Image (cartoon, coloured by chain):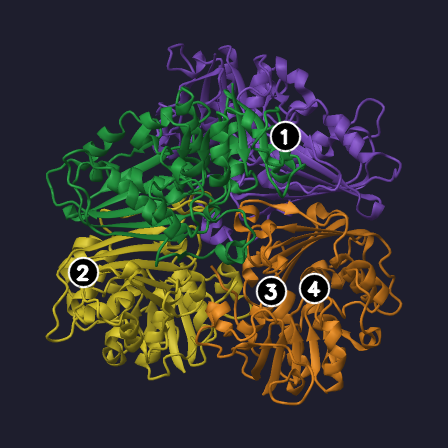
Chain colours: A green, B purple, C orange, D yellow
């Protein structure tokens, strides 16, 4: 059994970790911390866990070696706001604890880029160097050996999986446009007027058009995709996120120009993800719905070439809280600890 | 492994059976029938099952002994419209197959009552006699030995569990009012204008006030509750169902008069459901949310006595597709086949 | 033209006043105050008003006689939280300004009751005496002459209109049960976790079962209904509000015992509301939907007597922000200023 | 008063015409036809119109001159499925009746294009020639004199208004990508499984990626935009519509390449729509929400140039049933009959 701790368990990402880990057969949930809710039973905050998880929030304690300490865990997940994990991760690593950070602290190898987009000086640039970007479909081997995994953002997961086959093969010319739509849980569990039911339901809007933090993350991912000898992508990346009136789900609609009309797009996608448990290339002509992945760790992709023209349209859907956050984190944990990648994640979507 | 067949798998109840049975560790899903979709892969209709269930709809075939026949199953679930199962159940029973009917065909011991409310002459009144009403919290022992279980309706499940402690103890005088609210999936997957998103979302309404088929089912349940020597309930039962703009969930608000002010209501409820895996009596003062049982087989109950007066208010929530249909059917199956009652049903709610 | 000011215009009630008053042909919107948003154009907060209302929020100024002062208005609406209006209303009345308070400050003639339920000592008990409860269908004449109108709560409006015909005629014996359901806008525009889309959508729950502030308001209304020589209602009043996942709408399901089986209920209701512009008694057997009054000032009522028994079930729907708040306030204004009651309110519901 | 008839009033477009025309000060609603509902009061189907519209559905009768005939109207709106209006319009025109068709029958000047995308031979190619495409912001003068107006599609309205300033000035090079999102009412009031609340809520998907009928309509519009001497747009037009879980609203996100970096985009848009009552160019940096136009005839547009690069992003929102259908039709009627364009349409959005 893997002894697991969670730092910051009161948001939606933390709640989803709890939901999934509470039934993971190889995990012993040892502690979950929250400064604001310390002492309160977890199931009091998340009533869906009543009877399934007998644990109370505790204050985070990173040092020491008692059984109440995070340092006694095999693995610690950080489900904290950006900029928190970097303050404590070095200490945990020194204590021999492995770490998966679900925030952005360790996603950028370039700490200047981090500072530019997140507005904070990085607290441990040395540790950043050893962090592995946790998108298993791109770098599974590195994850297996990592002490520290930076779990990808939700939009970047759906987008990178959708673009991987084309960009890795150097097939994209011109610009890439990422028109992405997210359910409201992506905005977190904070009390904001903008995400009240009365503000966000029965409405649809774009946000962050001038610049969103997931843009440089996607950009970095695209730069890493092409193999040796393959032309890198040199166009502009345009990323426009939208808020759609539902709880869960991301739908990325990706547009790029592929001048080669002889290429078998469907075959390319199927071959790329052939052996992947969590990426489903749908049949030609499909339009994946976000609910087809609701509550599960799948990413479903369809690839189109409307009217046989140069522009290729890729549709990629995930559940932002599962493959876009907690589920992928658990997938990374499974890889890090040598388990079957599907352990605890092998169930269908919740429809209807 | 229990070899299971499902008759009528294209509605929401069938879909939920598939979702839950696809991960049940003791079940081998052998066949699922549909006249309209025969030949089509199940996952084509329900995209959430892609990769999780490799089965196609077949035409129902009740007789014969080939491996493709329903008669070769250990257990057959009927997820058909009312009045269908009664045509085929006798034949299956004769073949040694046990049956759980999720429709209403076998819920009434009085076939006249069936005819009055469902408008059809019963096809097999003899078989009705041996059918066991499948509410485990009321008659678990009978279910264990049953060849044929009539799975309760969704409203009747939430209502009977909420009323059981009081009515069994003969504490209710006056009338009982059942004000119940259901998500739209209770209306089924049929193409009706009234359940279109544009008609049923952003609106709330009562329906069936003059008389709803679940009224006599609840009435029958209440009549069976009191033990020997306990005063039966003799008042009126008023049942008003409402449609609420969400997919899943039933909230029953139950009002009854309890003149005994010395009674410890909370204690009574906790004692009644003490050993039940799927009934959760919440702490004093609670207001259970339907989402606290979304996707799982729990029923959560809170009991109130506002201002210390005579009227007691019981709040009872279930997921209509799980504890109100497919989940309870699987709970019944577990009991019938000697499994731990929670097998395949031991997971938390999906929140958010 | 009536010169109108609004105090506290940043909540949903204020926003709805703005929406309706911006097209009222007899109103000149003179000022709208907000401490937090002073200086900001109203249409910046409420984008739906862009191009329709050229006004900025100002700081409240109750005294003085300049044109920027509230004291220069003919009428001031308070759309403030409970306990705010009572601090300033006396001053405005002294300056000859008439006032409609949409909060609860002046709804109770008994200031002890106010204090008990709202937890604040009343600031102007003398002024309370002259306040008129603004339910036109009950006391139109008093409203016409009032300097100060207490606009009813949303639940009390739907409930009192539904009960009026029966209680006024002294027909109710036993208890009255009010099972009421509200859209989320009733909880206001404050930033609370509980009303986030991800918490409140796809779920249904009761709240305030032990005691809700609208209970004594309804109780007071019921006490005032019976005419001279008519038996007052002496039973218990039970009030259970619920939160339903939609923005607008209240559905009150009312249960009471009417022992007289000879009474023509439908006729009684039709006669009572015959000459009312904003109460629609629906045909026998109807189930009014909340969307049938979405955005408009109607109340629609249906009366049932299931199975011809003693319990009568009344269904009453309103839009909580219109007939339950801003619309009714404008209806009251029309009455106070001698206008046709439908002025500015004569439009159909927004369906779908 | 304009004597108005509506053919086919049982869908959402018809319902919205009724809602808006019932309060239009210059319109006398004379008749509304429906084959399926003939004889039934309109308010029985659309309960929101109870008390506001005393009219029953009648069978369509196009000839004759009695007061019950469509031929006695000044104007007839067709709110019928595609391919119906073209069968009857010639007769009405001959009778001196002016016509606005809300379906696609007269939108294409090229009847071959019509046949290719709609699969039906056109019934009156001669009449097509005189039809005017009813987008007032593009060709107001022609509409004023038209006998027959083809009301634009919902997606084409939002898209063309968003592209007009750039394409008219010949500023677009490369391709244009239209990523559009619609509420479910765009799919109509037909009983389809795909638009049930349980199928379409809490989910998001693209549809019609291989080819959607609004693609050639937008293409035709773009071809007509450039003035004399201006370079036409020669790139590819990519159009991907999506279904978003809400009732009303369209959000078009438009991507195109503008190589001229000196151009003042905000100024260009403001100048273009300066004198338009129903197009609102929002301030720099805005993200229009669809709810900001809910129930009203506005189109709100924001123009972005992320990171100062070549790709311009235009956000354009309308209510699909108002500016995207019934509201625009009434705007066209106002123009045709010499009324102020805002008559009957001058009200704010319904928020929340």
Residues packed near mark 4 inside 10 Å, few (<14), some (14 to 19) or many (20 plus): many
Between the C-alphas of marks 2 and 1, the distance is 70 Å
* Residue marked by disc 2: D122
> Badge 3, how many Cα within 10 Å: few under 14, some, many 20+?
many
Q: Which residue is nearer to you in this view: A93 or C159?
A: A93
What residue is shown at x 59% (from left), y 71% (from top)? C9
- Above or below — where is A141 with respect to A79? above
Residue under numbered circle 4: C153
Of badges 4 and 1, the one in the foreground is: 1
**Badge 2 density bin: few <14, some 14–19, many ≥20, Cα 10 Å:** some
Mark 3 and mark 2 in contact? Answer it, CB < 8 Å.
no
Q: Spatial distance from mark 3 to mark 1, Cα to Cα?
A: 42 Å
Q: Which residue is disc 3 drawn over?
A: C321
* Placement of B344 over or under A235, stated as above or below: above
Q: Residue B351, can we see it?
A: yes
User: Is label 2 on the same chain as label 1?
Assistant: no
Can you give x and y, in whole percent of width and height, for residue A302 in the image?
Answer: 27, 39
Residue B269 coordinates in the image, percent (x, y):
76, 31
Q: Nearer the viewer, mark 3 or mark 2?
A: 3
Q: Find the distance from the CA under tag 4 to the CA under tag 1.
A: 42 Å
Question: Tags 3 and 4 in contact by the CB under 8 Å rule?
Answer: no
Pointer 1 residue: A55
Q: Is residue D147 above or below residue D161?
A: below
Chain-order first, disc 3 or disc 4:
4
């Amino acid at each position: 059994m893997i002894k697991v701790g969670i730092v910051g368990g009161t948001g939606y990402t933390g709640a989803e970790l709890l939901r999934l880990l509470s039934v993971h057969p190889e995990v012993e949930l040892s502690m979950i911390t929250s400064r604001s809710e310390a002492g309160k039973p977890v199931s009091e905050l998340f009533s869906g866990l009543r009877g399934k998880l007998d644990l109370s929030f505790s204050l985070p304690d990173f040092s020491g070696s008692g059984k109440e300490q995070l340092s006694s865990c095999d693995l610690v997940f950080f489900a904290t706001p950006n900029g928190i994990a970097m303050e404590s991760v070095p200490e945990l690593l020194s204590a021999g604890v492995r770490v998966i950070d679900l925030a952005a602290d360790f996603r950028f190898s370039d700490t200047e880029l981090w500072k530019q987009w997140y507005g904070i000086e990085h607290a441990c640039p040395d540790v950043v160097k050893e962090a592995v970007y946790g998108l298993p479909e791109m770098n599974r081997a590195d994850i297996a050996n990592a002490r520290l995994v930076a779990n990808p953002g939700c939009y970047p997961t759906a987008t990178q999986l959708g673009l991987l086959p084309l960009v890795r093969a150097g097939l994209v010319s011109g610009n890439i446009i990422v028109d992405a739509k997210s359910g409201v849980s992506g905005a977190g569990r904070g009390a904001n007027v903008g995400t009240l039911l009365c503000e966000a339901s029965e409405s649809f809007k774009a946000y962050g058009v001038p610049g969103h933090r997931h843009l440089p993350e996607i950009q970095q991912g695209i730069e890493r995709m092409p193999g040796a000898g393959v032309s890198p992508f040199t166009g502009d990346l345009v990323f426009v996120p939208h808020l759609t009136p539902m709880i869960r789900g991301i739908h990325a609609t990706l547009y790029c120009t592929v001048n080669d009309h002889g290429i078998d797009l469907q075959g390319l996608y199927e071959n790329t993800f052939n052996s992947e448990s969590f990426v489903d290339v749908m049949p030609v002509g499909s339009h994946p719905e976000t609910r087809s992945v609701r509550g599960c760790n799948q990413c479903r992709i369809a690839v189109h070439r409307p009217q046989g023209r140069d522009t290729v349209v890729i549709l990629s859907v995930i559940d932002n809280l599962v493959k876009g956050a907690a589920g992928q984190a658990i997938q990374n944990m499974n890889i890090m600890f040598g388990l079957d990648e599907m352990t605890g994640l092998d169930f269908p979507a919740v429809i209807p």
